[in-house]
């Protein structure tokens, strides 16, 4: 009894990945039967036939399934920087202008909310828009292809640091204006969403560039060590 059961299991495993040619033939036959006969077996790309709207405008249009839309023609770097700028400005508007707390708590909260937005909205949006070339990895501090729980905390801590650097950018800008104008201890430029978004994108991309440079140098060093080991 045991021998028969073992033989049956082996036969089942061997045939499990066999290509079912008869099933493929049945599928092809079914698809041929579903194609419209009046068009000679060819699929129509006429908009009027597809939509059922037999207006003169649709009768003159042909549907192109390979047409590239206008949004796809925009370079990836333009879309990435604009998305980062827009979300940063929105967070600044809702947090900086919506809460009445002291400046230090406001900066920490602003960075935490920005990190949360990046982790929950911005990075998933980049993953949704990217192709197999992973062109949006260069615009993420933690470009991991999987959703991990620890990335939430790393993004929050990282963007708190970014917000503090942005605060120093405002301080340096005001000091420069005061130096040129001959005044002192005057705030010429206050925090507002547009300039905050610009400063955030600049600081963020500087940190990401430093991180990418370290990664590239580390990979080069590893490859050099491997080549030296192989030569020995």
Image: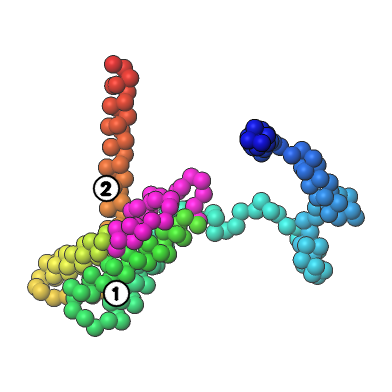
Image coordinates for residue 223, horizontal then vertical, percent: 32, 29
Numbered label tally: 2
Give the residue drawn at x 55%, y 55%: 72
Image coordinates for residue 209, horizontal then vertical, percent: 30, 48
Give the residue drawn at x 51%, y 46%: 132
Image coordinates for residue 55, horizontal then vertical, percent: 80, 70
Q: Do we see residue 148 in this rendering?
A: yes
Residue 130 highlighted magenta (yes or no): yes
Which element carries disc 2, helix, strand or loop?
A: helix
Image coordinates for residue 224, horizontal then vertical, percent: 29, 27
Residue 203 sits in quarter: bottom left
For discs 1 and 2, the disc positioned in front in the rendered view: 2
Binning the other alpha carbons within 10 Å of mark 1 as few (below 14), some (14 to 19) or many (20 upward) gives few
Quick check: 159 left or right of 104? right
Q: Which residue is mark 1?
A: 192
Which element carries disc 1, helix, strand or loop?
A: loop
Residue 105 highlighted magenta (yes or no): no
For the view shown, which residue lies furthest in the right direction? 38
Which of the pair 195/86 is nearer the observer? 86
Q: Quadrant of the C terminus?
A: top left
* Span colored in magenta: 129-156
Q: Do we see residue 58 in this rendering?
A: no
Do residues under tags 1 and 2 come within 8 Å of each other at their CB atoms? no
Quick check: 140 left or right of 182? right
Which of the pair 68/32 is nearer the observer? 32
- Height in image: 227 above or below 9? above
Q: Which residue is mark 2?
A: 210
């Amino acid at each position: 009894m045991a021998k028969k059961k073992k033989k049956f299991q082996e036969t089942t495993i061997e045939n499990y990945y066999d290509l079912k040619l008869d099933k493929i033939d049945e599928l092809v036959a079914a698809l041929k039967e579903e194609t419209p006969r009046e068009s000679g077996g060819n699929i129509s790309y006429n908009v009027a036939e597809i939509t059922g709207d037999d207006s003169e405008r649709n009768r003159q249009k042909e549907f192109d399934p390979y047409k590239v839309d206008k949004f796809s023609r925009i370079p990836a770097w333009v879309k990435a920087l604009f998305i980062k700028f827009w979300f940063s400005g929105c967070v600044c508007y809702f947090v900086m202008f919506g809460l009445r707390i002291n400046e230090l708590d406001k900066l920490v909260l602003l960075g935490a909310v920005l990190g949360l937005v990046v982790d929950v909205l911005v990075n998933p949006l980049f993953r949704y828009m990217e192709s197999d070339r992973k062109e949006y990895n260069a615009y993420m501090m933690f470009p991991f292809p999987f959703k991990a729980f620890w990335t939430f905390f790393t993004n929050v801590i990282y963007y708190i640091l970014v917000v503090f650097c942005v605060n120093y950018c405002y301080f340096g800008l005001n000091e420069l204006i005061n130096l040129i104008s001959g005044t002192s201890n005057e705030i010429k430029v206050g925090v507002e969403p547009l300039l905050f978004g610009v400063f955030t994108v600049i600081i963020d991309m500087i940190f990401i560039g430093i991180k990418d440079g370290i990664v590239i140098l580390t990979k080069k060093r590893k490859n050099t060590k491997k080549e030296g080991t192989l030569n020995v």
